[in-house]
Image: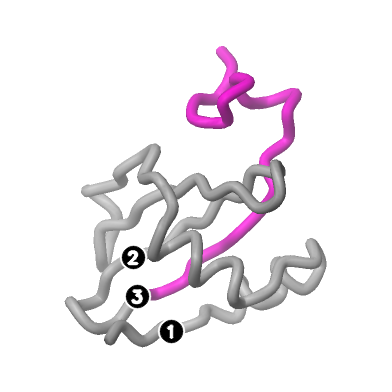
Amino acid sequence: MKSFLWREHALARMTERGIERQAVIDAIKQGEVIRDYSDDKPYPSRLRLYWIDGQPLHVVSASASDDVEIVITAYYPDPALWEPDFKRKLP
């Protein structure tokens, strides 16, 4: 079973944005990886897209190990900045 390490930044932004921890956990477990940041240090990270009641949620996290996922940030993507499927940023 995976445990989650919550960065202070992630928790602050989640509170500001009204995003619950369970939604982030669900996004990490079930969301679609839409971007892979394999060069990130100290751990490679991923951007995931997860839908909650028709609303897109983006979560960035990194796997510290097979058992530990570090939650970096979570946000509701701005439709003015993303393609309609919320998988790619607009040019």
> Magenta region, mostly helix, strand or loop?
loop
Residue 10: image quadrant is: bottom right
Residue drawn at (80%, 67%), measured in percent from left and top?
18
Amino acid beneath label 2: Ala
- Quadrant, the C terminus: top right
Q: What number is the disc on residue 69?
A: 3
Q: How far is the residue under mark 3 from the one under mark 1?
A: 6 Å
First-in-chain label (2 vs 1): 1
For mark 2, does the 10 Å Cα neighbourhood hold few (<14), some (14 to 19), or many (20 or more) residues? Answer: many
Counting from the top left corner in percent of width and height, residue 37 is at 30, 46
Q: Which amino acid does label 3 sit on?
A: Glu
Left or right, residue 16 beside residue 89: right
What secondary structure is marked by label 1? strand
Kindly state the secondary structure of the residue where label 3 is placed: strand
Give yes or no for contact between labels 3 and 1 (Cβ–Cβ under 8 Å). Answer: yes
Question: What residue is pinned by disc 2?
Answer: 62
Q: Mark 1 points at which residue?
A: 5
